[in-house]
Amino acid sequence: MQRILSTELAAHPYEKVRVEGWVHRIRRLKSVSFLIVRDAAGLAQVVLTDPAALTATEESVVSVEATVTPNAQAPNGVELTAPVIHVHSAVDVPLPFEMHRPELTASLPTQLDHAALALRHPARRAALRISAAAVAGFRATLEAHRFVEIHTPKIVESATESGANVFELDYFGRPAYLAQSPQFYKQLMVGVLERVFEVGPVFRAENSDTARHLTQYTSLDAEMGFIDGHRDVMAMLTTTVAGMFAEVTERTGYATPEVPSEIPAVHFVEALRIAGAPADEPDLAPAHERALGEWARREHGSEFVYVTGYPMRKRPFYTHPDPDEPSYASGFDLLFRGLEIVTAGRRLHRHADYVAALSAAGEPLAAYQGYLDAFRYGMPPHGGWAIGLERLVARLIGAANVREVTAFPRDPHRVAP
Amino acid sequence: MQRILSTELAAHPYEKVRVEGWVHRIRRLKSVSFLIVRDAAGLAQVVLTDPAALTATEESVVSVEATVTPNAQAPNGVELTAPVIHVHSAVDVPLPFEMHRPELTASLPTQLDHAALALRHPARRAALRISAAAVAGFRATLEAHRFVEIHTPKIVESATESGANVFELDYFGRPAYLAQSPQFYKQLMVGVLERVFEVGPVFRAENSDTARHLTQYTSLDAEMGFIDGHRDVMAMLTTTVAGMFAEVTERTGYATPEVPSEIPAVHFVEALRIAGAPADEPDLAPAHERALGEWARREHGSEFVYVTGYPMRKRPFYTHPDPDEPSYASGFDLLFRGLEIVTAGRRLHRHADYVAALSAAGEPLAAYQGYLDAFRYGMPPHGGWAIGLERLVARLIGAANVREVTAFPRDPHRVAP
């Protein structure tokens, strides 16, 4: 007998079918009991007239052979009657928290301690499906625009991109480091494939336990060659975010906000003014980002806003200056609902410019040998971005903490399960 | 003027266009010079009647505005005449090796030392495109069968899956380890989404410098719940490999071998006999795998062969025994052209079986707390596989070394560039 998913049952009235899944809930009434089975698609209601036939406890895994019986009052308009239940795996211990409530009421740390269980809750699970759909939309949009997927090293020789915040590991007796981003490698690959993207883990040894930081997160990186300036990168990013949200809605039914074809963009200097920050601030604080998010919604009806032209002095050495105002970067951040979810920009592409920038930063050129090679041997004007997947999804579904949309989050105090 | 890719030029006869790319080769003849420009798509020939106009050297990045002129003897049937050349980035040093030969003649170590340059060679670049297409086919096939993409931790608390061969890192003053595989996490996620896959890096601190080992490689993992046995996993894997090869051919034009709808399968005991190995061998050596590959081609006309039922004593603790012959595993490897590229199988799914297996292996249960949680709270029968991407691609295109199909390979002696 072929297995039928819970959401497909209504298409099989009066048929005998097999349903498999987890015991989501048991409700024992006077003359009848209900067994709610949860599978990958949803929930199915099984009716038992003999309560003694029901020995399985919640979260046990069962296979139920039964008849699909229309019942307008049951979920999906059907219930399963005259069941024969086989238990694949019995649960014989109490659960650490109830799984059948509309929301998990256990504290987040308790949920994370029992992640293998908590993630089964329909709300937590839905966030993971939204995350997967967003990534699929990211890839599909970029592949439609000639981007090629790459896989780059996560173990690197030098802690170059930023001296601090890197994890050191023992590489056959030598020190090596976990890559903080695929930045250098995706740039090198522009020299090979012109347009590339990578979806992969990045690692930050930042000892800050906030609701928006993880020590490992999924970075959605892209880099494109032969651009005229950072506006080409901005246009491609807007298209990509729109493609991601469209795919989320297509795959999961989740209603995503409109991505304007022209996302409002404000220069950093103007952004400080809007946020009411001092004009000499070198960066935007979280409160400034929130103020800008409110401004974009109020003034432009947009959940998104670009902030362009951050001061060069706070940007990494590979940042390309704005040709018209060299003390500001030819780059931008994307804020979504008042939170920075993307950092983007144009990069230097001439070898001499890298030598000058690294020298000015007091960096030893030797540590950048493999990277500088690409520029010595010819690179086109290029730029790209990095989207933090967990931040984007948390902001999209209104989760207060990125840990709620990450399967097994890592932070300074959590490295298990 | 919009940029036209080299391979699209023939569609624009007599038009004035812009082509951008790298100077692939310069050929100076008596009365005329040819500049071959390489872009992401292919090569374009630019004709210069004034040799003094050509100052750019090989691998310089140029933008060429010129007229598309049909010429049956030129590549793609067109050449670019009356060019105006702008140099984005000039190369003013000699290249470490010639880039315009049909094959790179530099030794592999030299290529790897200058990876940012060597990867630009059309042959090396083609392998990366094939790799990307294979991954796209992997995802598309699985998503069409209800699999959901996941992202799991690469930093783990315990060196559990196999005590040896793990990289240790400093996690805020405590030891932690790089994940050797997403095995445990993908199993836990079967409890959440029933069918999951992950494409991501895995890390092996194996100090062996062979043509088929890397310390970081890309693992294509899948895991599925509610199986009847390992044959369900095998059928899904066959479908997936066929989908991967179809996508490679679709995207790149590379002719892939037929994937039989029923890949021949031999039991381990029979495999030893075919390979002429002693009957008490616990595993297959590379020479045995090659013999089996030849046998499959000769006897079944297949480039693929499954070897089932490896002895339990050499398999990891989570391996499910064959219900009919419990000293053999309910699992299998897939050999492609005489090389193991996939390990697959059914896993234990009952908590008591895990406790017994770990105890028999002398493993402390406490180290497996988060993992065992999933089984304590109900898991279905399940199984899955891990495909080594680089091995598969190397075998597909006939590369002798996995380093030839990896952008920036990592091995015990190489952690840069």
Image (cartoon, coloured by chain):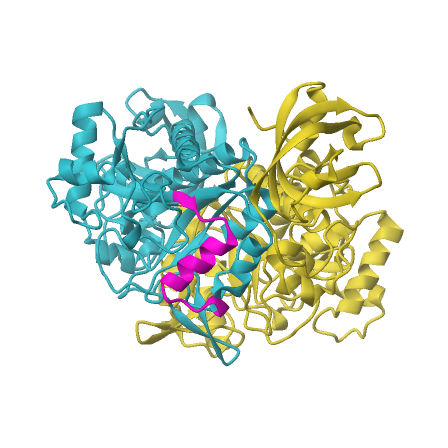
Chain colours: A yellow, B cyan
Residue A378: give x, y in percent of width and height. 39, 53
**Is the residue B314 above or below the residue B275 in the image?**
below
Instruction: State the image coordinates of residue A63 (x, y, percent, origin top left).
Output: 59, 36
Residue A72 painted magenta:
no
Figure quadrant of residue A256: top right
Q: Depth check: B343 or A404 in front?
A: B343
Q: Is residue A389 left or right of residue B143?
A: right
Name the foreground residue: A225 vs A325.
A225
Residue at the image point whose x is 67% and y is 19% from the top: A15
> Residue B398's image quarter?
top left
Residue B80 is left or right of residue A2, and the answer is left
Which picture quadrant has residue B40? top left
- Tell me, yes or no, whether the highlighted magenta stretch contains residue B364: yes
The answer to whether residue A330 of the structure is visible from this angle is no
Q: Is residue B57 above or below residue B331?
A: below
- B358 vs A139, left or right, is left
Q: Position of residue A140 (x, y in %)?
A: 56, 37
Can residue B147 be seen in the rendering of this structure? yes
**Depth check: B140 or A257 in front?**
B140
Residue A249, horizontal then vertical, whole percent = 71, 37
Residue at the right extreme? A298
